[in-house]
């Protein structure tokens, strides 16, 4: 399972709908292979979607998340004016720091 973050932004004069979480979750279908989606509004007009996806590899997971986002922007009328500003697996910078051995 992979976590892929997708970032969406509405035009600056628009705000996210109050029920954005329900709208996104209800649009996910079994063929998306999304086990869970976390919805995090980051401002009145921006949000990050955290897709927990089943995939054979990292590239497939990111591609699957992009396809789901494109479909959401087409199929959910309240998100029709939003644009995808980025997507990818979040990196854990502390996981790559060298450890000291005492």
Image (cartoon, helix red, strand yellow):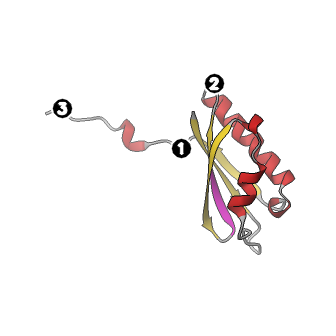
Where is residue 46? Give x, y as percent: 67, 64
Q: What segment carries the magenta color?
A: 45-49
Q: Of helix, strand and loop, which one carries label 1?
A: loop
Give me the C-alpha separation between circle 3 and circle 1. 27 Å
Q: Quadrant of the C terminus?
A: top left
Task: Quarter of the image for the N terminus: give it.
Answer: top right
Q: For the residue carrying disc 2, how many other residues have a C-alpha within 10 Å: few (<14), some (14-19), or many (20+)?
A: few
At which x and y percent is residue 91?
49, 41
Q: Residue furthest bottom?
A: 13
Disc 1 target residue: 90
For the residues bearing labels 3 and 2, Cβ distance under 8 angstroms? no
Cα–Cα gap, marks 1 and 2? 18 Å
Dots 1 and 2: beta carbons under 8 Å? no
Q: Mark 3 vs mark 2: which is more N-terminal?
A: 2
Residue at figure coordinates x 73%, y 41% from the top left: 66
Mark 3 surroundings: few (<14), some (14-19) or many (≥20) residues within 10 A:
few
**Residue at image coords 70%, 35%:** 33
User: Residue beneath label 3, please?
Assistant: 101
């Amino acid at each position: 399972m992979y976590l892929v973050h997708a970032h969406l932004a509405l035009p600056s004069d628009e705000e996210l709908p109050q029920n954005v979480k329900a709208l996104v979750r209800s649009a996910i279908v079994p063929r998306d292979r999304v086990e869970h989606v976390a919805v995090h509004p980051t401002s009145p007009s921006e949000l990050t979607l955290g897709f927990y996806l089943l995939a054979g590899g990292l590239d497939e997971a990111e591609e699957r998340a992009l396809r789901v986002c494109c479909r959401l922007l087409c199929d959910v009328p309240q998100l029709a004016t939003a644009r995808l500003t980025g997507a990818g697996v979040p990196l854990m910078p502390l996981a790559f720091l060298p450890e000291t051995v005492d």
